Image (spheres, rainbow, N blue to C red):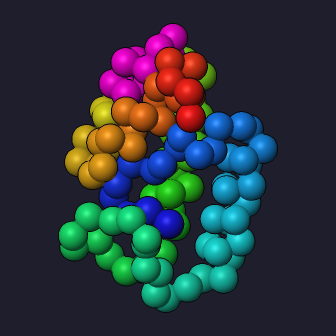
Amino acid sequence: MYGNVHLWMADAQTDSERKAWAEQLDEMAALKPKVVIPGHMTPGTAMDSSAITFSQKYLADFAKAKASSKNSAQLIEKMSKIYPDAGLPMALEIGAKVHTGEMKW
């Protein structure tokens, strides 16, 4: 679970891994939790279901940005525009390189 930081996408390289992640988030959201404590977050992140929503949206946005990017620089640029204030930019940089085949993970 992430709160206002870039998701660590390097460990979710296949469609099936990302689909399983999204399904897990859907299951969590269906529980309608009042308190959610993200394992990775910026200071001041709300401890509520917005972390689930953030993670769901990020996965979807990453998939769209990846599909229309020719290299990691394009993917990073697109995701940085969508999430200009997200922390952990290193996660985006590594994830983008892994997903575009520029780095082995």
Q: Quadrant of residue 100?
A: top right
> In this view, which residue lies farthest toward the top?
70
**Residue beneath the point at 46% across and 87% down:** 35
In the image, residue 35 sits, relative to residue 72, either above or below, namely below
In this view, the residue in front, 16 or 10, is: 10
Please say whether residue 78 is one of the residues in the magenta stretch.
yes
Q: Residue at x 49, y 88 (%)?
A: 34
The prevailing secondary structure element of the residues shown in magenta is: helix
- Measured as percent of width and height from the top left, residue 67 is found at 60, 22
- Give the residue at the far right of this rendering: 16
Regarding residue 50, the answer to whether it shows in the image is no
Q: Looking at the image, which is closer to me, 91 or 64? A: 91
Position of 73 with respect to 17 (left or right) is left
Quadrant of the rendering where the C terminus is positioned: top right
Residue 21 drawn at (x, y percent)? 67, 56
Q: Position of residue 5 (x, y in %)?
A: 34, 54
Residue at 74%, 55% (x, y): give it: 20
> Does residue 74 sit above or below 94 in this rendering?
above
Can the viewer see residue 7? yes
User: Quadrant of the rendered structure where residue 76 is?
Assistant: top left
Point 55% across, 85% down: residue: 33
Magenta span includes 80: no
Magenta segment boundaries in residue numbering: 69-79
Residue that sits furthest to the front in the current view: 104
Question: 92 left or right of 24?
Answer: left
Q: Is residue 101 above or below residue 3?
A: above
Q: Choose between 93 and 81: the one closer to the eye.
A: 93
In this rendering, the count of numbered labels is 0
